[in-house]
Structures are given as C-alpha cells and as structure tokens.
Image (cartoon, rainbow, N blue to C red):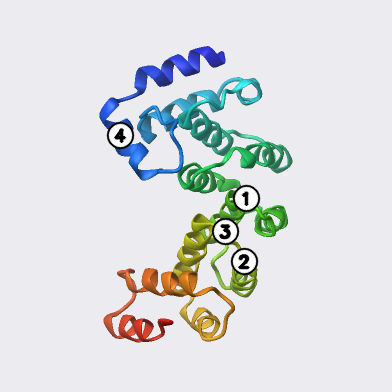
Amino acid sequence: MVENSIKEQLFGLAEVDYQKFSAALIPNINNVLGVRLPELRKLAKIIAKGDWRTYLEQADNEYFEEIMLQGMVIGYVQTDLDELLRYAADFVPKIDNWSVCDSFCIGLKLTITNREPMWDFLQPYLLSNQEYDIRFGVVMLLDYYIEEEYISRVLQRLDNIKHEGYYVKMAVAWALSICYVKLPEPTMTYLKSNSLDKLTYNKALQKITESYRVDLETKKMIRSMKRK
C-alpha cells in the first residue's frame, strides 16, 4: 500500500463539516482534512496487518490525519518492545497537538505488560523542554501508571515538571485529578504540599471536582483548597 494511495483514501474519507468541527478543537494547527477517528482506526488496522514498516518509513506528514494515522499504526502493530520503542521515539517529534499526543498514548497498550522498561523510556520526555515531549510523558503516566506501585514516583515526576506550555499544564492537572480519583490519600497528601504553579494546581482541583466519582462533601473541601 503506497503512500499516494493512503493520501487518496484520506481525501476520500474527508468531510467538510467535520473538518470545521475538528479544526476548531485543535486551534494551534491548520492542516486538518476532516476524517473521523473511527475511519482512521479502520485504515490503521489494515496497514498494521500489512507491510507497516515500509508505510511508516515512507509516510507523509503534510496533514493532521496522516500523522494521527502513523501513531495509530504503531499502536496496532504486532512486534517486540524494542522495535516498538524505536518507532515510538521516531514518532514523538512529529506530535504538535494534544489530539495526536493523547491518541498515540492510549494506543501504546504494550505498556501494560512492559511497565518498567516503558517507565525508563518515558523519563527523557518528562525532563524535556519541549511542550509535546512532556505532554506525551505525562499522558503516558496517567494512562498506565496511576496505581499504588507507581503513585509516589508519578507524583514526584509531575511535581518536577516546570514548563509554561498550556498543554503541559493541562496534562499535569488532568493527571493529578486521575491520581486523586484512583488514590485519594497519597494524592491529597501531595496536594497539601507541592511546588505546582497556581494555574496547574487550581486546574487540578477543578478537574477533581468535575469527577462524578468524587462525592459532594469532598468536592466542597477540594474547592476550599483553591489558591487565590
């Protein structure tokens, strides 16, 4: 399946109305065709069953959907961890928006059975000065590492992130809200003593109060912790 054929298929799947909707959700890019995610997933699964290595080597990066598709293919392929990590490392620099980042992370299911080597793989991204490198690392933490065995390490890593990028701050706040929902005691201890900036801290509290898994009394208490 050559790259030109992929591009033609994407053009054929594009919808004008969906393009406007999708583009509005990702304001920092202007290369959206308007292909729905279920259609991209179908195509990614087909590519992953074929000569996916050649596809990834030759894939074009002109459109949002072309990059999104590459990330999905990496998530679907059947290969060993070392090879997957090589392709993941090649892909991360292409991430330039939250949608591609978060979709790519949720597709890396191999993490579930390889948590320690994946943890090591993620550390340079969490220490990066690039907005989407960091967001990739943070979203991977919230997707796969918020459990008792890792919670202290996760909270420490989140607290050490100092970056002014909006999509970093929102990812850290989102991750902390999931930490609280899943493991409230260690997360509350952390929230009472942390080095988060005010925006990230208050956004984390807001996201906690928006969870249906937090009771009304607790939400009231969380709101009282807001920094003025």
65 above or below 172? above
Residue 139: give x, y in percent of width and height: 53, 56
Residue 205: give x, y in percent of width and height: 41, 75
Which element type, helix, strand or loop, lies under badge 2?
A: loop
Measure the C-alpha gap from mark 3 to mark 2.
12 Å
The answer to whether mark 1 and mark 3 are in CB contact below 8 A is no
Lower sequence index among marks 3 and 2: 3
Q: Residues within 10 Å of mark 3 (few under 14, many from 20)?
A: many
| Location of residue 108 by image quarter | top right
Quadrant into which the N terminus falls: top right
Q: Say which amino acid is labelled 1.
A: Asp
The answer to whether mark 2 and mark 1 are in CB contact below 8 A is no
- Residue identifier under label 4: 20
Q: Say which amino acid is labelled 3.
A: Val
Left or right: where 104 falls relative to 226:
right
Residue 217: give x, y in percent of width and height: 29, 86
- Residue identifier under label 2: 162
Left or right: where 122 falls relative to 144:
right
Left or right: where 37 falls relative to 15:
right
Lower sequence index among marks 4 and 3: 4
Measure the C-alpha gap from mark 4 to mark 2.
34 Å
Q: Residue at x 40, y 43 (%)?
A: 27
Which element type, helix, strand or loop, lies under badge 3?
A: helix
- Residue identifier under label 1: 133
- Residue identifier under label 3: 138
Q: Residue at x 38, y 68 (%)?
A: 207
Measure the C-alpha gap from mark 4 to mark 3.
29 Å
Lower sequence index among marks 1 and 4: 4
Measure the C-alpha gap from mark 2 to mark 1.
13 Å
